[in-house]
């Protein structure tokens, strides 16, 4: 029986896997004091390291975190008194299509409050704020003015290192032949790296079998 223990990825600065696709984003987090207007939108596909970078920044700044669905109930003046992180910020306006202006107004006031105090604000999202659908012209203007840094799809070297990290988070040291086998066949995305490692680890635990190329071929159907 496999017990459903939760895997906790290492999210320290030294645990971040750096490569050409995310180097600019890492530099922006390290250089947060120089953000124009003390705001930044960190953009990228799922599983590319946005949450890891956000955790690094939160540790550097002692930032508080606001869930997107808590925006309307929050006091923008109070929030703007300290650094703030909003992850999955593309969810801030999920009710806009339903015709509710509540979150648009709340976000507008939040951005104004941070502009007044000068405290840093970090948003992570899948798409740039300038591309979000909003009805308030003034809000659209403020979103367009937020500087952004984008994480690109990983190259093979970074994918290799991501596989190693995901295995390490599960207490597994993979062999180089296994990594090479996966890299030759896997989808070229950070999300695929995370999902494949999770799938192989679960299968290996269930079968009480060591991870190997033949085992991975059988499990993944490759």
Image: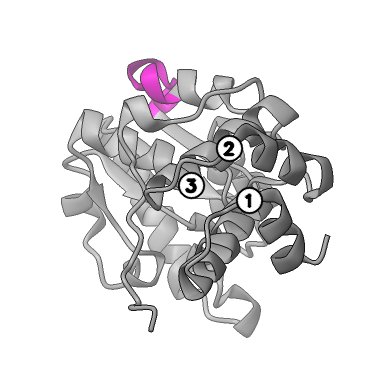
Q: Secondary structure at mark 1?
A: loop
User: x, y (%) of residue 54?
Assistant: 38, 41
The residue labelled by disc 1 is 212
Q: Secondary structure beneath disc 3?
A: helix
Quarter of the image that includes the C terminus: bottom right
Distance of label 3 from label 2 (alpha carbons):
11 Å
Q: CA distance from mark 1 to mark 3?
A: 13 Å
Residue 151 in view:
no
Question: In the picture shown, does residue 202 fall above or below 49?
Answer: below
**Residue 158, x across and y down, in percent:** 63, 29
Residues marked 2 and 1 touching at CB (< 8 Å): yes
Which SS class for mark 2?
Answer: loop
Q: Give the side of residue 56 with respect to residue 174, left or right.
A: left
* Vertical relation: 189 (above or below) 1: above
Residue 175 tag number:
2
Question: What is the spatial separation of the Cα atoms under label 2 and label 1, in whole angstroms?
Answer: 8 Å
Percent x, y of residue 18: 53, 24
- Which quarter of the figure has residue 99? bottom right
Residue found at x 26% / y 55%: 76
Above or below residue 144? Residue 198 is below
- The mark tally for this picture is 3
| Mark linked to residue 160 | none
Q: Which residues are magenta?
A: 29-38
């Amino acid at each position: 029986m496999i017990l459903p223990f939760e895997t906790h990825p290492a999210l320290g600065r030294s645990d971040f896997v750096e490569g050409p696709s995310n180097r600019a984003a890492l530099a922006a987090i390290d250089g947060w004091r120089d953000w124009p207007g003390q705001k930044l939108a960190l953009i990228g596909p799922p599983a590319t390291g946005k949450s890891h970078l956000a955790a690094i920044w939160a540790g550097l700044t002692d930032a508080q975190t606001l869930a997107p669905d808590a925006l309307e109930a929050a006091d923008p003046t109070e929030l703007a008194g300290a650094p703030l992180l909003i992850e999955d910020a593309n969810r801030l306006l999920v009710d806009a299509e339903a015709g509710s202006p509540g979150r648009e107004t709340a976000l507008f006031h939040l951005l104004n409050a941070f502009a007044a105090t000068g405290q840093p604000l970090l948003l992570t999202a899948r798409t740039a704020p300038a591309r979000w659908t909003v009805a308030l012209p003034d809000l659209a203007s403020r979103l367009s003015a937020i500087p952004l840094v984008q994480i690109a799809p990983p190259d093979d070297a970074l994918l290799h290192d991501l596989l190693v990290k995901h295995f390490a988070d599960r207490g597994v040291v993979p062999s180089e032949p296994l990594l090479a086998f996966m890299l030759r066949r896997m989808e070229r995305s950070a999300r695929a790296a995370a999902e494949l490692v999770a799938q192989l680890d679960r299968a290996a635990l269930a079968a009480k079998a060591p991870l190997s190329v033949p085992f991975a071929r059988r499990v993944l159907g490759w």
